[in-house]
Structure formats: C-alpha cells, structure tokens
Amino acid sequence: MKKKEDRLFLVTNDDGIRARGLEALIEVVRPFGEVFVIAPEEGQSGMSHAITVKHPIRIRKVSEEEGLVRYSSNGTPVDCVKLALHKLLKRKPDMILSGINHGSNSSTSIIYSGTMAAAIEGCMNEIPSIGFSLLDYSPDAKFGSVVKYVEIILRRALEKGITEDTCLNVNFPVNSCHKIKGIRICRQNKGMWKEEFDHRTDPQNRDYYWLTGEFHNLEPEAPDTDEWALHHNYVSIVPVHVDLTSYRALDQLRKWDIESG
C-alpha cells in the first residue's frame, strides 16, 4: 500500500460543488492523501453516463490549499472525470471517489445515477473507484453517522484492493431512531421505478409535466440484496462491473442459428 504522501484521490459527485455530501467525503479522504476535486457547478442528478457534446465545457478553480484543490465544471459527472484524467491531472489518480450522494443509488437506481456513472468511468479507465450514497434526499442531509463507515471502506479498499474491472456501489441507510448495524456485501436488488407524470399548467397557460413515481421492490424478502440490507439498517456494498452482456442468453441466442461467416 502506498504512503499517504504518494496517494492522489480524484473526488467528484452529481449534486454539485456546494453539496454537503461532497464536503463530508472530502474531509474523510484528506488524511489519506492528496485530493483533487472537480464537481458540477450545479446539480446533475439523474444524468447517468451522459457526456457533453453540443456545447463547450468550462471549468472554474474554486479553491486551492495544501493537499486539496477544488474545481467546478458546467459539465456532467462523467465530463468531470474525463476532464480530470485527460486534461487537469499530471498523473493517474490512485482512486476515484464519488458522492456522498443525497439520495439512494441502490437497486436499479444505479442506471440513472450520475454519482455511480463517475465511479464506473473510473472503472473503465482501470482506476479503483467507489460511489457513496446516503438515503436522504434533503440538501441539508446529515452525514455524521456515516463518515466513519466511509473511512472503514476506504481504508479496506486501499489495503485489500478492488477487483479489476469492478467498482463499488455503497449505500447508507438513514434512520434517526436506530444506529447502523454494520456492513453487508450484497447483490443488486431486482426492482423498478413506476413513473408517473404530474400534468401542470404554467402562468402562461402552457402545459408541462413533472416526473414523479415510486420504487417497486420485486424481491422484498431476499436477504442477500442491497434493498434488504438498507431496510434492515445495514450499509450495503454492491460490486459493479461495466460488461452488460447477458451471459445466460448467449446459448439461447446461438440456437437461433443466425450467425454467419
């Protein structure tokens, strides 16, 4: 394991450069090495792996002090990672950390998550990466009860490493009545969002729609899933990889007998 003075961490998020979760993550990471932060100027939740191709990407240095530099960008979380890796950093970071997100990224929410997209982008560049999320969507969310678990997970990742082609999706429960019971290694829960669009009319009498919806857990009793762990007040860790191939379907598709050449 590298010494503190030799480590470089890239930190980002999707809630924006002023988010409380980002500040909480920075404070946890600083004792472990040099920290370079680049995050969206404004919130970019739900952007998934989007990149900016239709207008210029701009950056702004927010602050600089010993061991810590902060930048903001008008781009997406993935834009931020790409800018850091290919333009702003003099060397590849030892780890990419994203979050701490205000809101859940468990189950299929990972598909929509800008927080996890940043971690996945790191994984694609062969950099150990972790996304952290707290199940509290409030801008004023309190992170005091989870920072010690961020430190535990970060320390263990540095000591033991993360499997190649894999990043970690870490979610923290929020429950003011009970303490977190511990950490569980999980698989991603099967679930889906049932969307609804609230139809409204603006002051100019023009129609518009506001996305709402509810999450439907399709296996609520499965104790090996992230949703079960979070519901029972555990921190969940799900290993995630980029390969979207459905290997179970390969043999079935080959029976179609449509391959040629």
Image (spheres, grey):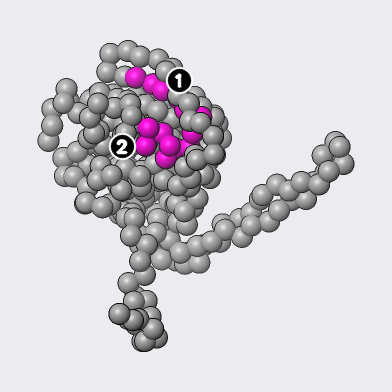
Where disc 2 sits, the SS reads strand
Residue at screen point 50% across, 67% down = 218
- Name the disc covering residue 96, or none: 2
Q: Position of residue 63 (x, y in %)?
A: 40, 15
Q: Is residue 133 above or below residue 229?
A: above
In front of the other: 96 or 206: 206
Q: Position of residue 83 (x, y in %)?
A: 37, 32
The outermost residue toward the top is: 65
Residue at screen point 25% across, 26% down = 90
> Do the numbered discs 2 and 1 sit on residues whose CB atoms are within 8 Å?
no
- Name the disc covering residue 60, or none: 1
Q: Name the quarter where the N terminus is drawn.
A: top left
Q: CA distance from mark 2 to mark 1?
A: 20 Å
Query: Can residue 196 be spotted in the picture?
Result: yes
| Magenta residue span | 69-83
Q: Position of residue 25 (x, y in %)?
A: 37, 30
Q: Is residue 80 above or below residue 48?
A: above
Q: Name the quarter where the C terminus is drawn.
A: bottom left
